[in-house]
């Protein structure tokens, strides 16, 4: 669990108190007001795995919060050694108030250490219309990463596939990654992306039923059953 001032925003801190484990093993992450006298006005939650892998499939089964503008709920891979490794990250992100869509993202570095993301053309395929409200039940989100591409799945269905041709500079630089889940609020510089965060007057709560890494295993673990004709 993370417990420090968040680096990607200036209005909240990570708090271990915002992570709880139910009797059935479900993990809840919450975004709340901070107590009086705190260094920042809001508290969020972040958990990460001890296990790491370079290739394989990262999986999360979760129920998104009832979101609000300016909030972000992410399930993602991230470089295992955050101080020394080049940036590599694959994301599922619920952004703002709409939980019927999820955004996919990839972050890498080129040989010069420059930050590279999906090209504008590839980004057109990165916002997925789910066909359901992710805040109303559990769903499984998976990303399979190989030396040449990444395939994203939701409930066993492939929703996107990206490779070097979809990245700025045709870069494809991967490395050891852990699994993360977080819930946080944006600051003013991120409002164009996520909306303006104002206190919704209630906690935002995400529930994670399970998360795992299957090193060197590719494809969804969920068999999609076609409806009878």
Image (cartoon, helix red, strand yellow):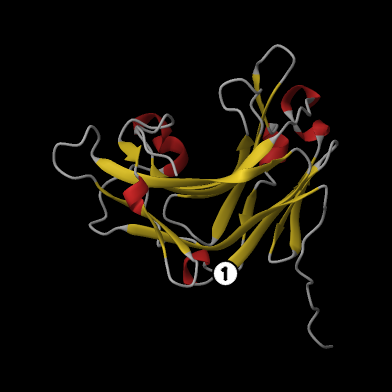
Q: Secondary structure at mark 1?
A: loop
Q: Residue furthest top?
A: 112
Q: Position of residue 45 (x, y in %)?
A: 40, 47
Q: Position of residue 125 (x, y in %)?
A: 70, 47
Which quadrant is the N terminus positioned in? top left
Residue pictured at 80% horizontal, 25% vertical: 170
Q: Which residue is rendered at x = 76% and y = 27% of the image? A: 173
Q: Is residue 226 above or below residue 179?
A: below
Residue 223 in view (yes/no): yes
- Can residue 105 be seen in this snapshot? no
Residue 39 screen position, x and y as percent: 23, 32
In this rendering, is residue 70 above or below 208?
above
Asked if residue 65 lies left or right of residue 88, the reply is left
Looking at the rendered image, the quarter that the C terminus falls into is bottom right
> Circle 1 is placed at which residue position?
132
Tell me what residue is drawn at x 74 percent, y 65 percent.
156
Left or right: 88 with respect to 1?
right
- Number of marks: 1
Residue at horizontal 67 percent and vertical 33 percent from the top: 120
Q: Where in the figure is residue 196, as x and y percent of width and height?
A: 34, 42
Relative placement, left or right, of 41 versus 86 is left
Most foreground residue, 105 or 175: 175
Relative to 223, 213 lies left or right: left
Q: Residue furthest left?
A: 36
The relative height of residue 131 versus residue 196 in the rendered view (above or below) is below
Res 34 quadrant in image: top left
Of 150 and 30, the residue lying toward us: 30
């Amino acid at each position: 669990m993370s417990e420090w001032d968040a680096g990607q925003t200036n209005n909240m801190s990570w708090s271990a108190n915002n992570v709880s484990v139910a009797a059935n093993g479900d993990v809840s992450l919450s975004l709340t007001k901070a107590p009086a006298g705190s260094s920042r006005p809001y508290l969020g939650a972040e958990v990460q795995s001890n296990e790491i892998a370079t290739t394989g499939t990262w999986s999360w089964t979760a129920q998104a919060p009832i979101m609000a503008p300016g909030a972000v709920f992410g399930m993602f891979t991230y470089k295992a050694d955050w101080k020394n490794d080049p940036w590599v990250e694959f994301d599922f992100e619920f952004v703002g108030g709409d939980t019927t869509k999820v955004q996919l993202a990839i972050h890498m570095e080129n040989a010069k250490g420059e930050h590279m993301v999906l090209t504008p053309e590839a980004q057109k395929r990165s916002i997925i219309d789910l066909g359901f409200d992710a805040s109303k039940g559990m769903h499984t989100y998976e990303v399979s990463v190989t030396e040449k591409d990444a395939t994203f799945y939701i409930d066993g269905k492939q929703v996107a596939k990206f490779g070097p041709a979809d990245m700025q500079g045709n870069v494809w630089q991967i490395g050891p990654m852990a699994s993360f889940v977080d819930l946080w609020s944006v600051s003013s510089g991120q409002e164009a992306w996520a909306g303006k965060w104002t206190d919704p007057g209630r906690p935002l709560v995400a529930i994670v039923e399970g998360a795992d890494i299957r090193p060197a295993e590719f494809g969804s673990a969920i068999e999609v059953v076609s409806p009878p004709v």
